[in-house]
Amino acid sequence: MKAKKLRELFRSNKVIRVMGAHNGLSAKLAEQAGFDAIWASGFEISATYAVPDANILTMTENLQAAVIMNTATSIPVICDCDSGYGNVNNVIRMVKEYERNGLAGICIEDKQFPKLNSFVNGSQKLTPIHEFVGKIRAAKDTQEDPDFVVIARIEALIAEQGMEEALERAYAYEAAGADAILIHSKKKEPDEIIEFVESFKGSVPIVVVPTTYPKITVKEMENLGIKMVIYANHGLRSAIKAMQKTFAQILIDGNTLGIEPNISTMQEVFELQGMFEMRRLENMYKAIDLMVPLRK
Ligand code: SPV
Ligand code: MG
């Protein structure tokens, strides 16, 4: 059902806006803010375990986090599956598991296992094109729901392999059946993304992650023909700043009075976690219980 929703977004004529999340709460906040979909970010999920984004966590741990996000929201969850947790055999099992658990789609990147976050310099090792094409083909052949989305992520620009390499990979991944191409960049300006988008003559939708080139607007992306934007980690980064500020202030003040106006109320948290809904249901079934004749 979520896969169908994601397909509908791809068919719409607007830019799909996706927010990174790592758990039920952050995913729910993204939905409430009005985002179209959730990015189950490997970087964010790793950070919440306080471990590096370098395939330290297992597929099962990432899947579990994605399932929690999926359950907490009604919008599609697109799962960052790194480079597919190994070779083609790992990709096949991965697709079965993600699909079976109701996730709308996955994204795999053309880096070697273990991957390293794209913004860490050095050791950005690409997987050969034919090998990654095999992974995409395997993913597409494995999915049972035709709506399940497989996004192929190109890391050629991250690995400084040049525009030609990035384009060659894009054509190969489109031909292999990818439902969308994610072109990643670590540049501070969107120039190489714009060059890629303008040079690419394929018809598969293009996805971008403007973490390092934050000035680009949705309007500009729309004009360029970009279909999806993923704000991959801004929720986590804002939460870290907020917590650091609060924790430090409590130690300085010696009490929590000063920080009270700047933090969510308990009532707000109750609402987010469904406490009031739980109480409503509890009361409803209590009343029903009274109407049922007691068994002798
Ligand atoms: C993630 O959010 O885990 C991503 C995006 O893959 S990036 O951190 O830019 O690699
Ligand atoms: Mg990632």
Image (cartoon, rainbow, N blue to C red):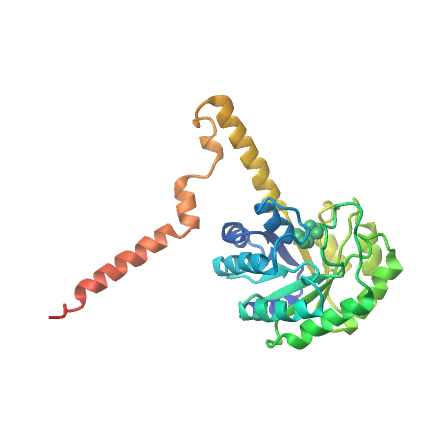
Rendered position, 130 above or below 232: below
- Which x, y percent locates residue 53? 67, 49
**Count of marks, rendered view:** 0
Instruction: Residue 4 in the image: state x and y as whole percent.
Output: 58, 71
**Can you name the residue that lies furthest to the left here?**
296
At 86% from the left edge and 61% from the top edge, which residue is drawn? 165
Q: In the image, 290: left or right of 151?
A: left
Identify which residue is drawn at 52% across, 50% down: 29
Residue 135 appears in the picture as rendered? yes
Q: Is residue 292 left or right of residue 112?
A: left
Question: Residue at image x 70%, y 73%?
Answer: 138
Q: Is residue 202 visible?
A: no
Rendering coords of residue 291 (x, y %): 18, 66
Q: Which residue is found at the position 34% from the left and 55% from the top?
A: 278
Q: Quadrant of the C terminus?
A: bottom left
Left or right of 295, for residue 114? right
* Image x and y of residue 181, in percent: 74, 64
